[in-house]
Amino acid sequence: MPYVSVQPADVADDRPVILFDLDGTVLDSAPGIVAAQQQALRDVGFEPPDEAELLSDLGPPPAVIFARIGLPEELITPAVEAYRRHYLGRGIRNAALFPGVAELLDLLRPHYRLATATMKLITTAIPFLQHHGVAGRFEVIGGAQDGVVDKPAIIKATRIALGEPPAEKMIMVGDRHSDISGGRAEGLRTIAVSWGYGSRDELLASDPDVIIDRPDELPAAAERLLAEVRG
């Protein structure tokens, strides 16, 4: 599982760790994702679903999404290749940091080790974070590689890159059920954010420790969760 240490990981650093999902949590990347999906489907001769349908299933890798909408198996690989060309070429400019997220990361950095654990390919996650000026806020950028669609595996690999801090001192933050279930599977506390792409019903069903509605609510929520662990 690939990862990138933006700064040399200090395994002796015993500060708590916060892992962030990217799409829907740090980055509002939906417009670029959907546009790239639609163009990729047209490239292989398949009429794409409308924007609302594609928006309802943001998060999984494109191969999974294309299979779900009925794209023939033999067209999935060329469609994925076309999607990546369109997304990296234009999607990077058709995205933005959610309001308040950059300030949140700056507020957290003195007190927490920060990393990402995203289903985004690492080769896409890095240039997106660099383009939007926040790559340096993360000690480790953890992301996916081809063929990996397992959120717990990405979280585990990111934890290893950080020197395997105790799970009880780690929090996973994300906007979809896979972020919450992945964090729980690895023994982490979880914070769901409502400003992303998962519905509130989805977030409630995933049973996070906390749901927050604004980035500025995260520091207090994280402190409460860690205080519960400390007893």
Image (cartoon, rainbow, N blue to C red):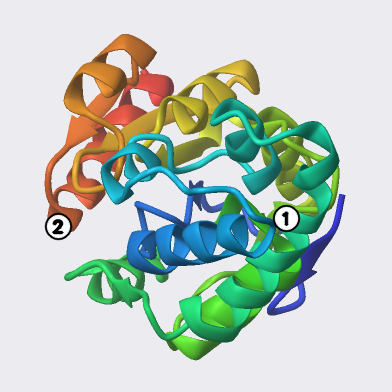
Percent coordinates x, y for residue 100 in the rendering: 18, 69
* Closer-to-camera residue (82/183): 82
Percent coordinates x, y for residue 167 in the rendering: 62, 29
* Closer-to-camera residue (211/90): 90
Residue visible at 24% across and 51% down?
A: 219
Q: Can the viewer see residue 9 in this picture?
A: no
How packed mark 2 is, by other alpha carbons closer than 10 Å (few <14, some 14-19, many 20 or more), is some
Residue type highlighted by circle 1: Val
Residue 227 falls left or right of residue 141: left
Residue visible at 19% across and 56% down?
A: 215
Residue type highlighted by circle 2: Asp
Of helix, strand and loop, which one carries label 2? helix
Q: CA distance from mark 2 to mark 1?
A: 36 Å
Percent coordinates x, y for residue 115 in the rendering: 57, 59
Percent coordinates x, y for residue 31 in the rendering: 34, 65
* Closer-to-camera residue (19/83): 83
Residue visible at 36% across and 75% down?
A: 95
Residue 14 drawn above or below residue 178 = below
Q: Can the viewer see residue 21 in this picture?
A: yes
Query: Which residue position holds label 2?
Result: 216
Residue visible at 35% across and 69% down?
A: 105
Residue 41 drawn above or below residue 171 = below
- Res. 114 mark: none
- Res. 80 mark: 1
Residue 57 falls left or right of residue 151: left
Residue 134 drawn above or below residue 124 = below
Looking at marks 2 and 1 on the same chain, the residue that comes earlier in the sequence is marked by 1
Quadrant of residue 157 in the image? top right
Of helix, strand and loop, which one carries label 1? helix
